[in-house]
């Protein structure tokens, strides 16, 4: 519960909130949005009424651009050093498998400790990882095994960061603005997907991968500063049960809740189906389209453009009750897009498909995130969102290894096409289970 507001201890909470909302300065100092509901297109940005969320978004804009620069530069560095599909898949595996292995522990930490402090710690450790990778690359001593070890370290940090950060969003806004906040956060993520790869492609071509890693490390300073500037109401968490009891409780809740379980199953299938295109994109850019690192940045940027459009539309018009249908429709669109992209021979035609892929992927992810967070109780939010992180990111390693192995045996085009068929099949299964969402409003 929020701490009492000085000078108003004896007043009814509803009266206090009404007075604060009518006075913008006082409302801002208490972490409340100003009075009045935004209308029209302003609805798409209504979560920005919350000061803490504005700070969060500001830091994310800078940091995520750096993160995407590092993602692209790391993939290109592995490709340049090895020209191996298998090692490209292995690099993704090392980054993501810790989220699957340790994600439940991250969710446990988010439900037992301050989520805000946990995010500050994980962002600081991520900054240190980027600086180490930059130092190794800029000095010319980097080796593939070092990239894999550092990727595993970053994945371990993310296993604790993702549940805490996802659970923190509702503390920065409100349940009414949750869908909007998650959609805007996804839009920022994908704006960075547009800008980051485009910058990375140019930087790698001119000065090399090491500078991308260095810039990413510097970008974390912005998000850490914004996190420290937040004014969050203290939240007391009950820590009566043992960590093991809390952990088992989270597993039982997710397994026993049909709507949550169905949503996670659908998103898990989409994660695996999308890994072939993501992991093998350097091969499409270089060996199929002959566009090099610049082509890779342009393709991923096109994907980001579609994702930004999709999440902004979702933030503006979507309602919680419509989210299962959003997930279904976009799974079908994603599968069809993968199938067409797999056999395209023209760079610009493939580039036109990338926005459709980004549009459908991120609308599904934002919809699933909001749907789950709307259903679950706050005391289980960290552990449940850990399962979401394990599904969205933690299953990626299995998809990336499979993508590398299948591509090595049957070719890149067949592998991406198979991913598209898997997405379509998952959508068909999800359609027959949509009755579990009838009570969601």
Image: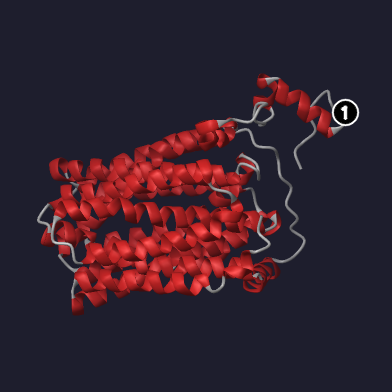
Q: In which quarter of the image is the N terminus?
A: top right
- Is residue 127 visible in the rendered structure shown here? no
Q: In which quarter of the image is residue 220?
A: top left
Q: Position of residue 325 (x, y in %)?
A: 52, 60
Q: Is residue 248 above or below residue 169?
A: below
- Reply above or below: 83 against 360: below
Drawn side of residue 333 relative to residue 138, left or right: right
Task: Establish if 162 lies above or below 404.
Answer: above
Q: Is mark 1 on a helix, strand or loop?
A: loop
Q: Which residue is drawn at 63% across and 71% down?
A: 258
Q: Residue at x 49, y 57 (%)?
A: 326
Residue that sits furthest to the right in the current view? 10
- Give the residue drawn at x 48%, y 75%: 429
- Of 53 and 323, the residue lying toward us: 323
User: Considering depth in this image, is 38 or 228 the residue closer to the camera?
Assistant: 38
Question: In percent of the image, x 58 and y 49: which residue is there?
Answer: 319
């Amino acid at each position: 519960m929020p701490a009492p507001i000085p000078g108003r201890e004896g007043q009814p909470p509803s009266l206090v909130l009404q007075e604060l909302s009518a006075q913008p300065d006082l409302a801002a100092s208490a972490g409340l949005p100003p009075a009045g509901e935004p209308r029209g297109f302003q609805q798409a940005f209504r979560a920005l009424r919350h000061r803490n969320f504005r700070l969060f978004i500001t830091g994310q804009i800078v940091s995520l651009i750096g993160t995407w620069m590092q993602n692209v530069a790391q993939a290109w560095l592995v490709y340049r050093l090895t020209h191996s599909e298998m090692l490209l898949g292995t690099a993704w595996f090392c980054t993501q498998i810790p989220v699957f292995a340790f994600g439940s522990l991250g969710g446990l930490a988010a439900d037992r400790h301050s989520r805000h402090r946990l995010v500050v710690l994980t962002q600081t450790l991520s900054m240190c990882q980027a600086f180490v990778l930059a130092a190794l690359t800029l000095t010319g001593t980097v080796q593939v095994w070092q990239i894999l070890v550092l990727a595993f370290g970053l994945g371990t940090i993310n296993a604790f960061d993702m549940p805490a950060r996802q659970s923190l969003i509702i503390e920065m806004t409100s349940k009414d603005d949750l869908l909007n906040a998650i959609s805007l956060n996804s839009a920022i993520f994908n704006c960075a997907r547009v800008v980051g790869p485009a910058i990375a492609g140019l930087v790698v071509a001119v000065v090399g991968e090491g500078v991308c890693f260095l810039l990413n490390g510097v970008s974390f300073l912005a998000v850490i500063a914004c996190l420290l500037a937040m004014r969050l109401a203290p939240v007391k968490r009950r820590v009566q049960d043992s960590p093991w009891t809390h952990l088992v409780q989270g597993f039982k809740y997710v397994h026993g809740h049909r709507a949550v379980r169905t949503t996670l199953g659908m998103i898990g299938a989409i994660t695996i189906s999308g890994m072939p295109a993501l992991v093998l994109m350097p091969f499409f850019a270089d060996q199929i389209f002959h566009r090099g690192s610049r082509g890779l940045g342009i393709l991923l940027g096109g994907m980001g453009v579609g994702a930004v459009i999709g999440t902004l539309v979702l933030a503006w018009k979507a309602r919680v009750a419509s989210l299962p249908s959003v997930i279904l429709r976009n799974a079908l669109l994603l599968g069809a897009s993968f199938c067409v992209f797999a056999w395209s021979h023209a760079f610009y035609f493939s580039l036109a498909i990338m926005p459709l892929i980004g549009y459908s992927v991120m609308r599904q992810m934002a919809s699933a995130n909001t749907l789950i967070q709307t259903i679950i109780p706050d005391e289980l939010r960290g552990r449940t969102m850990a399962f979401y992180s394990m599904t969205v990111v933690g299953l990626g390693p299995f998809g990336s290894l499979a993508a590398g192995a299948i591509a090595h045996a049957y070719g890149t085009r067949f592998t991406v096409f198979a991913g598209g068929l898997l997405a379509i099949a998952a959508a068909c299964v999800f359609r027959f289970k949509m009755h579990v969402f009838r009570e969601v409003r």
